[in-house]
Amino acid sequence: MSDAFRELLKKIGSGPHTGQSLNREEAASAMRMMLLGEATPAQIGAFSIAHRIKRPTGEELAGMLDAYDEFGPHLGAIAGIEAIVLGVPYDGRSRTAPVTLLTALILANAGESVVMHGGDRMPTKYGVPLIDLWQGLGIDWRSLDLAQTQAVFEKTGIGFVYVPAHFPEAASLIPYREQIGKRPPIATLELIWCPYAGNAQIVSGFVHPPTENMFREAFRLRGQAHFTTVKGLEGSCDLPRDRAAIVGVKHPERSPHDELERLLLHARDYGFSSVNVPLCSEAFLIEQMQDILKGEESDLLPSVLWNAGFYLWHRGIASNLEIGTQIAKEALSEGHILAKVGAIAEAIAAS
């Protein structure tokens, strides 16, 4: 049993009147001891649920990210490249059809460097994870070590950090999610983690407004000057169609101090219906994605164009969202995105 960890546990778990938040150094120490297995299973479980009840602070998330930086993997920086890191919930989607993967492919086809990360199906939602959707398109990120992933990333503009293989210390904490029946603070941490060693724009989805404030504070403390927050579908960075897409942008040149540029976007204003596509099954979703890659019509296509158009505009590739949508539509209809999938598969086979 770790006496040092027990003291940190006592600090956050003493109840609403005497409990306290950890400072950045203490949070980093707690995460370090959990990753290294220096805290006992009982201590880790108690910490996870106590911290869940208390709610993490931005400073605590900053400290935990410090520990992730110390022990976690990073794709190596590419000179002169600012990557875009798409942060989505590791426990996947269960109600709405995700289009994050197709957005990433369209961005990479346009010359962007995109980093994604996650693992297999996991608690508490056990929704469809990105890794399964990649597999459905014939892309097997699970087979690669980090050096091979780096090679694919440099060649194709897309890299996927597969946590079970590349960050086993973090993967060892996943079973606690099932045992406590709730997402622990680590699930929030994953949304803002950046497994890229160079300059990056981090895009993080959230559900509740207080979470966005935690993100902002953690980014401020860590000096992350370029990030985007999205009140997305099921906490992802996919823009919704049935309500206003609420986006916060912190740009190092356009956003002074800690201010966010706030965007409120309505799909109907850009010619899209106000309907989110439901997730019927993983198999049907993959079939829809394959149809889109072949240039065929699909109920999912408007969501793909809505999201890809936004991100192409957001990254400065298109001068406005409408032009971004047109760029995405042409790339799909002309077979460029299907060719990108083939290029990734070839790069993996050659690695």
Image (cartoon, rainbow, N blue to C red):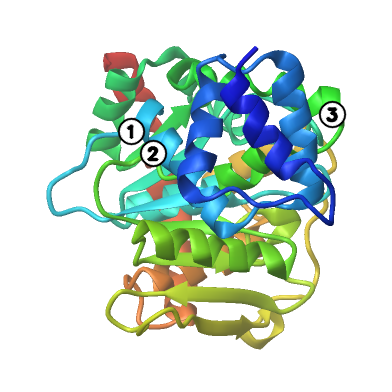
Q: Are marks 1 and 2 in contact (CB under 8 Å)?
A: yes
Give the x, y percent position of residue 253: 27, 80
Q: What residue type is labelled 1?
A: His
Q: Quadrant of the N terminus?
A: top right
Q: Earlier along the polypeptide chain: callout 1 or callout 3?
A: 1
Q: Quadrant of residue 244?
A: bottom right
The local crowd at label 2, few if under 14, some if 14 to 19, many if 20 or more residues have their Cα within 10 Å, is: many
Q: Vertically, is 40 above or below 340?
A: above
Mark-to-mark CA distance, 1 and 3: 29 Å
**Residue 287 showing in the rendered view:** no
The local crowd at label 1, few if under 14, some if 14 to 19, many if 20 or more residues have their Cα within 10 Å, is: some
Q: Earlier along the polypeptide chain: callout 2 or callout 3?
A: 3
Instruction: Identify the residue shown where x is 53% and y is 50%.
Output: 23
The residue that label 2 is drawn on is: 195
Instruction: Identify the residue shown where x is 33% and y is 33%.
Output: 74
Q: Which amino acid does label 3 sit on?
A: Ile
Mark number displayed over residue 180: 3
Mark number displayed over residue 150: none
Judge by depth and name the residue closer to the eye, 306 or 48: 48
Judge by depth and name the residue closer to the eye, 104 or 73: 73
Give the x, y percent position of residue 86: 49, 50
Q: Which amino acid does label 2 sit on?
A: Pro
Mark-to-mark CA distance, 1 and 2: 4 Å
The residue that label 1 is drawn on is: 74
- Residue 277 is left or right of residue 114, and the answer is right
